[in-house]
Image (cartoon, helix red, strand yellow):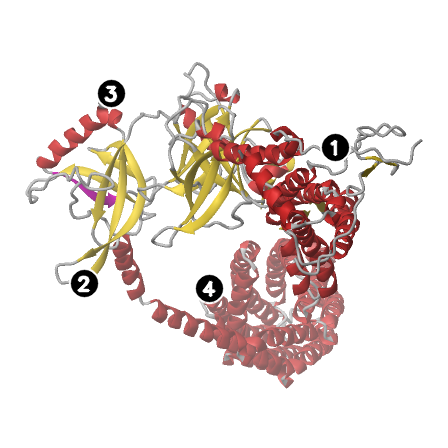
C-alpha cells in the first residue's frame, strides 16, 4: 500500500468505429426497417378498388363497412360518393388482393341489412355490427372488373348453394313474391320478387329450387299457391284446410308432379302458378297445346261482357281464348282521346292443325294470309241470357282490305270488324212494353166494383132478415099445427063417428018402420032437395081438382123463383099466413066444425025422432031420393078425392126432389110451395071455403030439419046405399092413407135428415124440426083415425 | 465560456469509480477487483447509445400519436381516439382537468424528455450556458419522471382488461398504445444510457476542438 499514486499514462487511443457506435443503434434501425417493411407490405398487399353503385347507401360507412364473401371480410369501403347525376351512390371498395382475382364482371353485390319479414328475421348480426356488403362470385379466375351494379335484393341462390332457376308466371293473383316453395312441408326453394310482365297481363317471378330437390321438378310439374286457407262445410262437418301456419301467414307455393315420365325441367323453364291444387291437377289433363300465339284485337265501343277466358272461335271451332283485357287510349282524328278495348287472343296453333316446332310462326303466317282474304275478328254474343261475348274469327266479304300488323307490340294485332251482338235487352224491352199496355188497371177496377156490389148485397138488411123471417114462419106453422083445436079435431071426428053409428042404427030402425008404414014417399021431396043441395055441393067441390092442379102448377113455378123474390114473398106469405091463421074465420073454423057436429048430432037426434015418426008416415020415398042425392054428392066427393092421389104423387115427387136437393134447392121448393100456398090461401075461394062449408052445413041442418018434418023416407034406403058406396069409396081413399102417411113419414125423415145435418144453433132449424115432429104426430093421429074407421061396424057392413 | 466553473473531476485526479459498487480505483485499472465490473472513466459509447435509443423513441412516438390509443366498441358504435383526439374530446365534454392531465402525461412530458435528453447530449459536446449543476438536476428529473409516462399505457392496459363485455362494450388497445409504451421505454433507456459524468468534464476550447477533430476522424 503506497501513498503514491502511480502515474498512469493516459493514451488518447484511437477508437474504432465499433467502439464509438453502440450496438444499440440496431434498435432504431430495426424499427425503421420494420416500419418500412410493414408500410411496403401494406402497399403491396393492397388490392384494387372497385366501384359498386347502389340506390342508397344506408348504413354504409367509410373505412368501416366491409365487403364479405361467405361472411369473410375481403374488402372494406374506402369511400362513398354520388354518381354525377346524383341519382345513385357509388361505393368504393378496396378489395383484398387474393379475392380480387375472382371478381370478374359476373360478380354480384348487395347490401345485407337486418330484415324482419313474414319469412323470418335475417341479417340480425348487422344490427350491432352495421350493414355490410355481400359479394358473390364464382371460382373461376377472370379479368378484374372495376364497376358493378349493386343488387337491390339478395340473389335467390345463396352463395355455394346449387339449384335450378325457374320462371314462375301467373295471370291472377296467385303469385306473390318472396315466398318459399314448399314440397311436403319442406322448403325446397324460393320465389323472388314478383314483377308484372312486360305485356302487362301476367306476373312473373324468378324462382329457384335448391339442389337436390331440383330433381323433383319435371316438365309436367304443376305449381300452385298454398297461401291462405280453405273452408269447406259438408255432410261430414266443417273442415278448415291450410298448408302450414307459415304459409298461412307468409304465403307459399308448392308443387307436385301428377304425371310421371316427363323429362326433368331445364334451367330457366317457365311454369304457371295455379290458384289451387284442384285447378293445377285439372290442368294436367287439359290438353295443353304447347305454344300459343298471342294476338291483339282492338275493339270499338263499349263492349261489356267480354271476359278473360272467353273463347276465340274460327268457323265455330274454339281455337283459343281471351287471356287479357285492357283499355288503350287513342287519339281520335278529331284530336280528342278515346278508350278502346284491347283483348289478347291466345290462339293455340295445334287447334289449327299445326303441330311440331315452329308452329307459332306458321300459325301467324296462316292467319296473316287469311286476313288478306278477309278474315276479321269480331265480337259476337256468346250467351243471350248472360250477355257474355266471345270473339269470332270470321271471313267477311266486302270489308276494306287490311293486313295483320306483325310488328305491333306487344303482340301482332289482327284487324277487327263490326260487332254482331244480339241485344236481348231490346227484345225483352218490347215484350215488357206490350205487357205494360194491357188494361190491367181497368180489369182490377171492375173486379173491385163487382166485389163491392156483392158485399153490399150480402150485407143488405133484407138478405140478412131472411133467416129471421123463415124462423118466424116456421114458428107460426108450429103454432097452428100445435093449436088445441087442431089437436082436438080427430077426437071430435071420432065422437062424431060414434054418434053417426048410433044414428045409423036408429036410421035402420026408422027404415024398418018406414017399410012398414010406407011413409017413405013423403021423404022423397026432402030427399030431392037434399039431392039438389048435394049437386050444388058437387059443383062447389068441382073447383077443388082445378085448385089442386093450380097448386101443382104453382109448386112447379115456385122452383123457378129467385131468392130475392122469395125473400119478399116468404115474408109476405108469412105475414099472410099469420094473418090467415090469425083470422077469425080460421080461428072460428074448428068451432064451426064443432058446431056443425053439434048440429049434426042434434039433427041426427031429431032425425031419429023423425024417423021414429016416419015409421007411421010416408016419407020414405022422399028419403030415398034424398039418399040418391046424397049418393050423387058422395060420388062428387069421390071425384074430388080422385085429385088427392095426384096431389100426393106430386108431393111425393116434391119429396123426392127434396131428397136429392141440397138445402138451397129445398128452400127453393119450399118457397115455391109456400108461394103456392100463399096464393091458395089468399084466393077468395079459399077464404070463402069456411063460409061455404058453414053454409053447406047450415043447409044440411036445414035439410035435416026439413027431413024431420017431411016424409021423404022413401029414398032413405037408396040414400043409405049411396052412403054405403060413399063409405066404401072413403074406405078406398082411406086405404091410400097409409101410403100417404108413409110418404109423409119418408118426407119427414128426409127433412129430418137434411135438417139434422145442421147444427142446432139456428132457431129456424129447431123450429122446422119441431114443426115436422108436430106434422108427424098429426099424421099418426090421422092413421089412428083411419084404423078407427076401418074398425067401425058401419064400414064393415 | 463565461460562467463555467471548472471543477476537479476524478478523472483529473487519475481515479475511476466503479459504477456498480462505487469503489474508487486508479484510472488505469481495467476491472474492479471488488465486483468484477469493467471500469471506465468515461463511457465512450454513452452518447452513441443515447442517440440510438433517442431515435428509436422518437420513431415510436410518431405512430403513438397518429394511431388510435383506444378502440372503444359499444353496442352500436365503435370509436377510436388518438391521444390528442381523446383529450380534445374530453375538453369538448367539459372534462378539462382530465384532458390536461392526459395532455401533460402523454404529450408534454414525453416531448420534454426528448428535448431534455437531446439538450444534455448536445451540451456535453457543444457546451452550454446552463451550469453543470442545473443540467445534472435536469438529468435527474428526466430519469425520475420518465417512468410516469407509462401511466397512459397502464390506463389502457387496465381498461382493456376490465372492459371486455363482449357484445355490449369492449375496449381494446390500439396500435398507439404499444408504440407509446415502446417510445417511453426507449426514452427511459436513452436517459439511462447517458453518462452523467460527462456533465462534469471541463469543456475548454481544446476539448471542444479535440472533440471536433475526433469527430472528423471518426467520420473518416
Circle on res. A9: 1
Q: Nearer the viewer, mark 3 or mark 1?
A: 1
Dot 3: within a 10 Å radius of its alpha carbon, few (fewer than 14), some, or many (20 or more) residues?
Answer: some
Q: Is residue A193 left or right of residue A38?
A: left
The answer for which chain carries disc 3 is A
Q: CA distance from mark 3 to mark 1?
A: 124 Å
Question: What secondary structure is the magenta-colored segment mainly?
Answer: strand
The answer for which chain carries disc 1 is A
Dot 2: within a 10 Å radius of its alpha carbon, few (fewer than 14), some, or many (20 or more) residues?
Answer: few
The answer for which chain carries disc 2 is A
Q: CA distance from mark 4 to mark 2?
A: 95 Å
| Quadrant hosting residue A651 | bottom right
Q: Is residue A377 magenta?
A: yes
Circle on res. A556: 4
Residues shaded magenta: A375-381
Q: Which residue is mark 3?
A: A355
Tag 3 near tag 2, CB within 8 Å: no
Q: SS class of the residue under badge 4? A: helix
Circle on res. A425: none
Q: Position of residue B53 (x, y in %)?
A: 67, 40
Q: Position of residue A210 (x, y in %)?
A: 51, 25
Amino acid at each position: 500500500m503506497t501513498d503514491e499514486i502511480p502515474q498512469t499514462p493516459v493514451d488518447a487511443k484511437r477508437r474504432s468505429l465499433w467502439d464509438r457506435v453502440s450496438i444499440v443503434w440496431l434498435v432504431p434501425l430495426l424499427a425503421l426497417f420494420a416500419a418500412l417493411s410493414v408500410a411496403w407490405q401494406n402497399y403491396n398487399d393492397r388490392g384494387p378498388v372497385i366501384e359498386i353503385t347502389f340506390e342508397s347507401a344506408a348504413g354504409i360507412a367509410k373505412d368501416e363497412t366491409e365487403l364479405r364473401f361467405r361472411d369473410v371480410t375481403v374488402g372494406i369501403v374506402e369511400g362513398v360518393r354520388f354518381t354525377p347525376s346524383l341519382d345513385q351512390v357509388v361505393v368504393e371498395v378496396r378489395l383484398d388482393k387474393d379475392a380480387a382475382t375472382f371478381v370478374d364482371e359476373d360478380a354480384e353485390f348487395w347490401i345485407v341489412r337486418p330484415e324482419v319479414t313474414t319469412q323470418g328475421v335475417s341479417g340480425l348480426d348487422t344490427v350491432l355490427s352495421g350493414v355490410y356488403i355481400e359479394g358473390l362470385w364464382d371460382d373461376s379466375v377472370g379479368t378484374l372488373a372495376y364497376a358493378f351494379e349493386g343488387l337491390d335484393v339478395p340473389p335467390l341462390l345463396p352463395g355455394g348453394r346449387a339449384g335450378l332457376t325457374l320462371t314462375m308466371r301467373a295471370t291472377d293473383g296467385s303469385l306473390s313474391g318472396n315466398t318459399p316453395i314448399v314440397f311436403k312441408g319442406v322448403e325446397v326453394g324460393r320465389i323472388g320478387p314478383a314483377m308484372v310482365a312486360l305485356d302487362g297481363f301476367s306476373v312473373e317471378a324468378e324462382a329457384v329450387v335448391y339442389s337436390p330437390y331440383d330433381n323433383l321438378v319435371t316438365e309436367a310439374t304443376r305449381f300452385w299457391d298454398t297461401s291462405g286457407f280453405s273452408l269447406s262445410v259438408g255432410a261430414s262437418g266443417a273442415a278448415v284446410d291450410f298448408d302450414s301456419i307459415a304459409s298461412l301467414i307468409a304465403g307459399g307455393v308448392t308443387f307436385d308432379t301428377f304425371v310421371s315420365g316427363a323429362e326433368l325441367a331445364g334451367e330457366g323453364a317457365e311454369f304457371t302458378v295455379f290458384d289451387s291444387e284442384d285447378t293445377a291437377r285439372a290442368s294436367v289433363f287439359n290438353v295443353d297445346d304447347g305454344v300459343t300465339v298471342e294476338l291483339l284485337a282492338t275493339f270499338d265501343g263499349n263492349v261489356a261482357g267480354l271476359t278473360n277466358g272467353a273463347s276465340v272461335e274460327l268457323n265455330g271451332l274454339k281455337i283459343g281464348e281471351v287471356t287479357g283485357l285492357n283499355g288503350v287510349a287513342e287519339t281520335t282524328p278529331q284530336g280528342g282521346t278515346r278508350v278502346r278495348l284491347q283483348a289478347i287472343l291466345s290462339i293455340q296453333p295445334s287447334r289449327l292443325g299445326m303441330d311440331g316446332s315452329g308452329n307459332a310462326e306458321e300459325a301467324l303466317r296462316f292467319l296473316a294470309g287469311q286476313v288478306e282474304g278477309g278474315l276479321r275478328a269480331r265480337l259476337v254474343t256468346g250467351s243471350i241470357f248472360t250477355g257474355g261475348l266471345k270473339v269470332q274469327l270470321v271471313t267477311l266479304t266486302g270489308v276494306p282490305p287490311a293486313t295483320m300488323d306483325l310488328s305491333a307490340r306487344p303482340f301482332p294485332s289482327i284487324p277487327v270488324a263490326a260487332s254482331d251482338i244480339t241485344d236481348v235487352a231490346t227484345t225483352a224491352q218490347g215484350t215488357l212494353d206490350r205487357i205494360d199496355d194491357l188494361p190491367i188497371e181497368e180489369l182490377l177496377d171492375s173486379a173491385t166494383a163487382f166485389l163491392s156490389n156483392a158485399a153490399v148485397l150480402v150485407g143488405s138488411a133484407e138478405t140478412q132478415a131472411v133467416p129471421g123471417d123463415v124462423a118466424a114462419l116456421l114458428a107460426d106453422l108450429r103454432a097452428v099445427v100445435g093449436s088445441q083445436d087442431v089437436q082436438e079435431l080427430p077426437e071430435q071426428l071420432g065422437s062424431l063417428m060414434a054418434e053417426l053409428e048410433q044414428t045409423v042404427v036408429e036410421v035402420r030402425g026408422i027404415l024398418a018402420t018406414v017399410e012398414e008404414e010406407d011413409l017413405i014417399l013423403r021423404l022423397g021431396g026432402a030427399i030431392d032437395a037434399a039431392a039438389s043441395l048435394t049437386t050444388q055441393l058437387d059443383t062447389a067441390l068441382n073447383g077443388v081438382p082445378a085448385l089442386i092442379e093450380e097448386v101443382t102448377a104453382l109448386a112447379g113455378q115456385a122452383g123457378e123463383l129467385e131468392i130475392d123474390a122469395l125473400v119478399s114473398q116468404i115474408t109476405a106469405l108469412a105475414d099472410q099466413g099469420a094473418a090467415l091463421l090469425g083470422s077469425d074465420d080460421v080461428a072460428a073454423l074448428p068451432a064451426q066444425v064443432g058446431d056443425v057436429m053439434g048440429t049434426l048430432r042434434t039433427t041426427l037426434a031429431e032425425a031419429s025422432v023423425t024417423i021414429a015418426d016416419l015409421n007411421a008416415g010416408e016419407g020414405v020415398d022422399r028419403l030415398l031420393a034424398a039418399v040418391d042425392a046424397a049418393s050423387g054428392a058422395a060420388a062428387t066427393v069421390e071425384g074430388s078425392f080422385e085429385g088427392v092421389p095426384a096431389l100426393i104423387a106430386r108431393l111425393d115427387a116434391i119429396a123426392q126432389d127434396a131428397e136429392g136437393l141440397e138445402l138451397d134447392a129445398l128452400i127453393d121448393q119450399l118457397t115455391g110451395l109456400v108461394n103456392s100456398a100463399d096464393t091458395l090461401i089468399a084466393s077468395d075461394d079459399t077464404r070463402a071455403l069456411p063460409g061455404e062449408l058453414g053454409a053447406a052445413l047450415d043447409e044440411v041442418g036445414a035439410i035435416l030439419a026439413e027431413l024431420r018434418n017431411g016424409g021423404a023416407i022413401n029414398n032413405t034406403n037408396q040414400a043409405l046405399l049411396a052412403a054405403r058406396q060413399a063409405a066404401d069409396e072413403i074406405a078406398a081413399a082411406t086405404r091410400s092413407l097409409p101410403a100417404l102417411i108413409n110418404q109423409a113419414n119418408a118426407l119427414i125423415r128426409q127433412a129430418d135428415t137434411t135438417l139434422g145435418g145442421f147444427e142446432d144453433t139456428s132457431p129456424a132449424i129447431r123450429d122446422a124440426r119441431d114443426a115436422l115432429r108436430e106434422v108427424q104426430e098429426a099424421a099418426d093421429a090421422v092413421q089412428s083415425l083411419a084404423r078407427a074407421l076401418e074398425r067401425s061396424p058401419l064400414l064393415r057392413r | 465560456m463565461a460562467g463555467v466553473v471548472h471543477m476537479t473531476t476524478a478523472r483529473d485526479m487519475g481515479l475511476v469509480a466503479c459504477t456498480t459498487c462505487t469503489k474508487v480505483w486508479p484510472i488505469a485499472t481495467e476491472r474492479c477487483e471488488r465486483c468484477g465490473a469493467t471500469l471506465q472513466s468515461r463511457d465512450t459509447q454513452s452518447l452513441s447509445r443515447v442517440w440510438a435509443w433517442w431515435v428509436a423513441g422518437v420513431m415510436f412516438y410518431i405512430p403513438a400519436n397518429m394511431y388510435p390509443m383506444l378502440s372503444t366498441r359499444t353496442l352500436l358504435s365503435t370509436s377510436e381516439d388518438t391521444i390528442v383526439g381523446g383529450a380534445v374530446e374530453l375538453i369538448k365534454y367539459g372534462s378539462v382537468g382530465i384532458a390536461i392531465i392526459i395532455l401533460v402525461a402523454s404529450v408534454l412530458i414525453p416531448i420534454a424528455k426528448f428535448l431534455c435528453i437531446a439538450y444534455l447530449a448536445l451540451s456535453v459536446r457543444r457546451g452550454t450556458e446552463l451550469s453543470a449543476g442545473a443540467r445534472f438536476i435536469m438529468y435527474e428529473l428526466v430519469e425520475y419522471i420518465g417512468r410516469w409516462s407509462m401511466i397512459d399505457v397502464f390506463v389502457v392496459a387496465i381498461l382493456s382488461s376490465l372492459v371486455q363485455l363482449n357484445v355490449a362494450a369492449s375496449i381494446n388497445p390500439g396500435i398507439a398504445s404499444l408504440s407509446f409504451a415502446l417510445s417511453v421505454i426507449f426514452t427511459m433507456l436513452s436517459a439511462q444510457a447517458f453518462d452523467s459524468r460527462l456533465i462534469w468534464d471541463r469543456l475548454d476550447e481544446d476539448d471542444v476542438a479535440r472533440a471536433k477533430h475526433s469527430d472528423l476522424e471518426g467520420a473518416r
